[in-house]
Amino acid sequence: MKKNRANVKRNDNSSFIYLLRDFKRLEYDSSREDIVNIISIMAKRFRTDIKSKVLNSNTDYKIKFIVKIVVYNLRMCQNRLSKIKTRPEVQLVVKAYIDSYSDTIKHFKKEYAEICPEAFTYENTQEAQKKSKSSEIARIFRDFGFQIFSSWIEIKNTDSDIAYVYRKLKEDKLIFDYIGESEFINFLYDNDYVDHIIGKLKSLHKISAKGRLFEYNSLKELHSKN
């Protein structure tokens, strides 16, 4: 039994060889205008290759093993690519590969979720968290309030900055009246907007500044038009 498992693993990992080979080739040829199309074609070739392996499998165990190892390796590829720092001109290649891996995982989920649901636990969890977060955003923010907040927090995330945007959004009725500051702070923690302990949010008159007001009004004007 151990020998069979090893053979399955070795054979199905071979499907990744030409992906890695093509990545190295394209990394130094990123000026090609058709690069995204090339990667898309490679992704389709990869999906066809895996489908062939599944169809030629004569046991449920082998099918599940193939699907699990493929999805796992695709996630690993995404994770590694997202962490590397490449030359600016190679970013197009990296993004195209990451997108192709995401599309391929979605494709496999559609094809094999019934056969092997456990292979897609991570994707199901991510989708559930995304739905939960969307529901939480709708419960806290009104109209374009979240768009202002998310743009603000990307570049201004000190305790005073956070207090300011909360107070201004409340003042402009872009956060619901029933959302107190403790609930807002919990929202920040739960969704990883901050990585440190936040104390009581300062009142607006202590943190008002012309620069902050200008930046806030600029974001408000931008997002109110969308």
Image: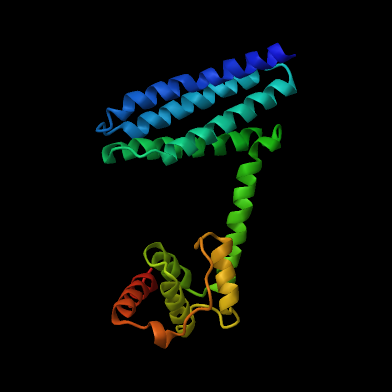
Where on the picture, by quarter, is residue 150? bottom left
How did the renderer colour the structure?
Answer: rainbow
Residue 220 image point, x, y percent: 37, 75
Question: Is residue 117 found left or right of 95 in the rendered image?
Answer: right
* Residue 170 vs residue 138, the one in the foreground: 170
Quarter location, residue 100:
top left
**Front position in the image: 111 or 15:** 15
* Residue at the image position 28 percent from the left and 28 percent from the top: 28
Percent of width and height locating residue 8: 64, 17
Outermost residue to the top: 3
Q: Quadrant of the C terminus?
A: bottom left
Q: Quadrant of the N terminus?
A: top right
Image coordinates of residue 133 in percent, x first then y, are: 58, 61
Q: Is residue 102 above or below residue 171?
A: above
Instruction: Where is residue 85? Give x, y as percent.
Output: 35, 40
**Residue ID at (52%, 71%):** 198
In this rendering, the answer to whether 125 lies above or below 114 is: below
Q: Residue at x 62, y 19 (%)?
A: 9
Horizontal relation, residue 4 to residue 75: left or right: right
Foreground of the two, 145 or 82:
82
Task: Work out whether 22 lies above or below 148.
Answer: above
Q: Position of 199 compared to 148: left or right? A: right
